Image (tube, rainbow, N blue to C red):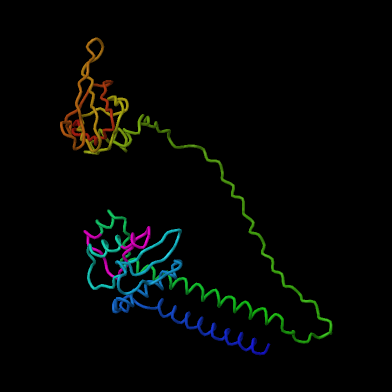
Amino acid sequence: MMILLIFCAIVIVVCGFVYAQSEANKQKIINLSLDEIDAMEGHQFEHYTAAMLQFDGFEQVQVTQASGDYGVDVVAYKGGHKWAFQCKRYSKNLGLKPIQEVYAGAKRYGADKAVVFTNVYFTPNAQSLANTLHVELWGRDKLADMIWQRKQEEEAKKEFKESVKQGNRKKEKQKEPSETVSDAPKEPIKEEVSYIEPIKQKETVVPKQENTEPVVKQEPKMESELMQMLYPVSPQEIEKKEVKNMATIIGAGKYVFGENIPMGQYDLKAVSGKGTLKIQIGEGDDFDDKWQNMGYNVKGFAETYSGLTLPKGWFFAIDGDLKCEITKSKMLEIE
């Protein structure tokens, strides 16, 4: 019985030592920088890859034999797939050869996922071939990302363990006997209560004032948003010639001179889309209209129409997805 207990104690000590060594090696691997990885030998990078794959959730990770590996350095399992990795610690970007080798080697090992893992990048031709053969390329950016994730995970574990330790310390302090409490009656603590008087708002009485100002007749508002955009001022200011060369964007719709567009002469310029400009050229029995195809950067379509002016009540219209900049090109001189 004593021998069995001694044997169990030895096993526990050995397992603890192995675990401690494993954790130490794990920390050493995680803390390696890219510069240190760049300085590795080829076989060192293979074992480094195997360790990183284990951290990343891969199972049954194995480094293949040094010779006769058929282009596969590490084999592992994850997500119901068998993965074949070729590991390349290089000083310049990788070309086609590693991709060809791991593609063929994966079939040899019965793997349905093939990956080239390296500390550098890949040439454009290599990326194109990998895309065709469905070989995954894990380059320097992927390597840096894996290192960063492992460090974040380890930091989170350390913080969690520290929080557990602090929680245990608090519990132990709470269990400690408190100081002796005197049996003498304590005087009641007088609470000091402060009151803030609400501010009484004085009612302000506004004396009624008789409206002595003369009634000013307001000008009628413009009837359309288009007129407000074209002329964000009063008609009197227009007559005083204070408005010049204002422009806005108009789209599909019907525009009647003197109703939803002020009288005047306009230039139209296509700024997007294409459509048709339709202009009334008669009324009553002589009603007619003319058409002009307009578009922005469209072959066979005009981009501008100049000098558009019509009698009051006549219209022009735009259809399609055509958008035009409309500018008043001529103001009547009123003396």
Q: Residue at x 20, y 21 (%)?
A: 290
Q: In the picture, which quadrant includes the N terminus? A: bottom right
State the residue at coordinates (38%, 72%): 63
Judging depth in this view, the residue of 72 and 134 nearest the camera is 72
Q: Which residues are magenta?
A: 105-126
Asked if 235 appears above or below 72 in the picture, the reply is: above
- Image coords of residue 67 (percent x, y): 30, 73
Q: Quadrant of residue 317?
A: top left
Judge whether residue 105 can be spotted in this image. yes
Residue 55 percent across, percent down from the top left? 44, 70
The residue lying toward the viewer, choosing from 318 and 244, is 318
Quarter of the picture holding the C terminus = top left
Check the image and report above or below for 9 versus 33.
below
Q: Position of residue 292 (x, y in %)?
A: 19, 26
Quarter residue 98 falls in: bottom left
Residue 7's spot in the image, x, y percent? 60, 87
Identify which residue, 109 or 92, lies in the foreground.
Answer: 109
Vertical position of residue 206 compared to residue 47: above or below = above
Q: Quadrant of residue 33?
A: bottom left
Total labels: the figure holds 0
Q: Could you tell me if residue 243 is visible in this image? A: no
On whether residue 100 falls in the magenta region, the answer is no
Q: Nearer the viewer, residue 222 or 24?
A: 24
Q: Is residue 118 magenta?
A: yes
* Residue reaching furthest to the top: 285
